[in-house]
Image (spheres, rainbow, N blue to C red):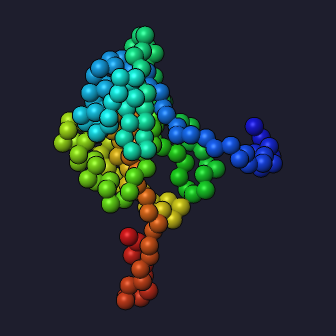
Amino acid sequence: MSEQTINEQTKSIIKLGKSIQVRLVSDLQASQIYYRDCLGFTIDNWGHAERDEVCFILQQAVSDQDVKPNAVSAKRSSYPSEWQGPEDGWDTYIHMAWDEFDEYVEEVRACGGHIGIEPFMDEHGGWQFKNAHILDPDQYNIVLGAMRRVEQIWTETGGQTDEL
């Protein structure tokens, strides 16, 4: 689809429902236990793993070769900031409240969850970000992220700014 086509399209009035990601897993029972006990999801007999606005359908893969977490995406310079894309493959990005981010990461850690990349902060495009990567038993990368606008405060010494 060309950029011109994207700009010319009219907005549809049809409402789409909740997005549910389907995950092929190497061991359905182990994945269900991990999503329940380490990530705090409820699990039903259909294979749904659900918590708040996030839902996965966990399905048993026929073969381990069918389990394919995402590879790293290509860098691109067309983002509306200096960021050019993630350094790791992302399978899911879960946005959460800034003030709840650290607590959830610690809950996952305390329950035996695998923190693939420890929490880190970055800034671009006028936003400050906190991210952490959680890996499930099949190495699907669940990126937790929180963001807030960068606030600049003038200090009393020479009008310099401190970024929060």
Q: Compared with residue 28, is residue 83 higher up or lower down, i.e. above or below? A: below
User: Would you say 93 lies left or right of 80 here?
Assistant: left
On the image, the x and y values in percent for residue 35 come to: 31, 32
Quadrant of the rendered image containing residue 60: top left
Kindly tell me whether residue 16 is visible in this rendering: yes
On the image, the x and y values in percent for residue 100 come to: 31, 56
Name the residue rendered at 35%, 27% in the picture.
Answer: 44
Name the residue rendered at 52%, 40% in the picture.
Answer: 18
Q: Nearer the viewer, residue 22 or 16?
A: 16
Count of number-bearing discs: 0
Q: Quadrant of the C terminus?
A: bottom left
Q: Nearer the viewer, residue 154 or 6?
A: 6
Residue most toward the left?
Answer: 110
Kindly tell me whether residue 88 is visible in this rendering: no
Q: Quadrant of the N terminus?
A: top right
Name the residue rendered at 41%, 80% in the picture.
Answer: 153
On the image, the x and y values in percent for residue 101 come to: 32, 53
Q: Compared with residue 55, is residue 77 higher up or lower down, i.e. above or below? A: below
User: Would you say 161 lies left or right of 125 here?
Assistant: left
Name the residue rendered at 52%, 37% in the picture.
Answer: 19
Quadrant of the rendered image containing residue 136: top left
On the image, the x and y values in percent for residue 10 come to: 78, 48
User: Would you say 164 lies left or right of 1 here?
Assistant: left
Quadrant of the rendered image containing residue 80: bottom right
Q: Compared with residue 54, is residue 43 higher up or lower down, i.e. above or below? A: above
